[in-house]
């Protein structure tokens, strides 16, 4: 599935070329698996649940469809700093995560876009979620 509407603004945040950003398309299921499975990934400072707290998220996804996440700072809204959950990947590359506590334990689905130096995460309703610099995606579980 090709999504470009909300990605343009997010891509401008981590790239310097408007023309490059306009040509982004979402990663396939195989690409998402190669990018994130059995790897630890740390975000750029980001908002959480709509709150501009500029927190840093670190996550790890194993090959058994389990995911772990941790924020550098305790988030607001009475949610835990650390959570775990399950994920599925659809054939079109959509990644769906259900956390035990975060996001009210409801499934959220996102698409991944690759730029020259980062991965952008955008929800299926075209809302930018987070960016991971490629240098901040490391093999193994480091969380």
Image (cartoon, rainbow, N blue to C red):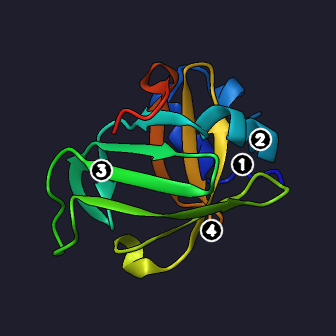
**Residue 138 position in % (x across, y down):** 48, 24
Circle 1: is it few (<14), some (14-19), or many (20+) Cα within 10 Å?
some
Query: Marks 1 and 2, how far apart in space?
Result: 7 Å
Secondary element type, mark 3: strand
Say left or right for 34 vs 126: right
Q: Give the numbered dot on residue 125.
A: 4
Secondary element type, mark 1: loop
Secondary element type, mark 4: loop
Q: Give the numbered dot on residue 4.
A: 1
Can you identify the residue that label 2 sits on?
25
What's the residue at 53%, 20% (across, down)? Answer: 16
Does the residue at mark 1 contact the one at mark 4 (Cβ under 8 Å)? no
Say left or right for 15 vs 84: right
Q: Nearer the viewer, mark 3 or mark 2?
A: 3
Q: Where on the picture, by quarter, is residue 76?
A: bottom left
Circle 3: is it few (<14), some (14-19), or many (20+) Cα within 10 Å?
some
Q: Give the numbered dot on residue 70.
A: 3
Which callout, 1 or 3, points at the residue further toward the start of the chain? Answer: 1
Does the residue at mark 1 contact the one at mark 2 (Cβ under 8 Å)? yes
Query: Marks 4 and 2, how far apart in space?
Result: 15 Å
Does the residue at mark 4 contact the one at mark 3 (Cβ under 8 Å)? no
Which callout, 4 or 3, points at the residue further toward the start of the chain? Answer: 3
Q: Give the numbered dot on residue 56.
A: none
Query: Marks 1 and 3, how far apart in space?
Result: 29 Å
In the image, 112 versus 15, the foreground residue is 112
**Residue 121 position in % (x across, y down):** 55, 48
In the image, 11 versus 77, the foreground residue is 77
**Residue 89 position in % (x across, y down):** 72, 57
Which callout, 3 or 2, points at the residue further toward the start of the chain? Answer: 2
Query: Marks 3 and 2, how far apart in space?
Result: 28 Å
């Amino acid at each position: 599935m090709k999504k470009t509407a909300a990605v343009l603004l997010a891509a401008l945040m981590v790239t310097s070329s408007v023309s490059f950003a306009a040509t982004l398309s979402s990663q396939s299921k195989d690409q998402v698996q190669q990018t994130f499975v059995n790897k630890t990934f740390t975000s750029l400072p980001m908002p959480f649940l709509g709150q501009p707290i500029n927190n840093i998220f670190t996550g790890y996804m194993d090959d058994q469809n389990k995911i772990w996440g941790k924020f550098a700072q305790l988030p607001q809204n009475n949610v835990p700093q650390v959570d775990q959950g399950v994920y599925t990947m659809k054939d079109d590359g959509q990644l769906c995560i259900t956390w035990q506590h975060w996001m009210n334990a409801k499934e959220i689905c996102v698409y991944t876009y690759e730029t020259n130096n980062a991965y952008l995460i955008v929800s299926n309703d075209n809302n930018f979620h987070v960016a991971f610099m490629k240098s901040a995606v490391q093999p193994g579980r480091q969380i």
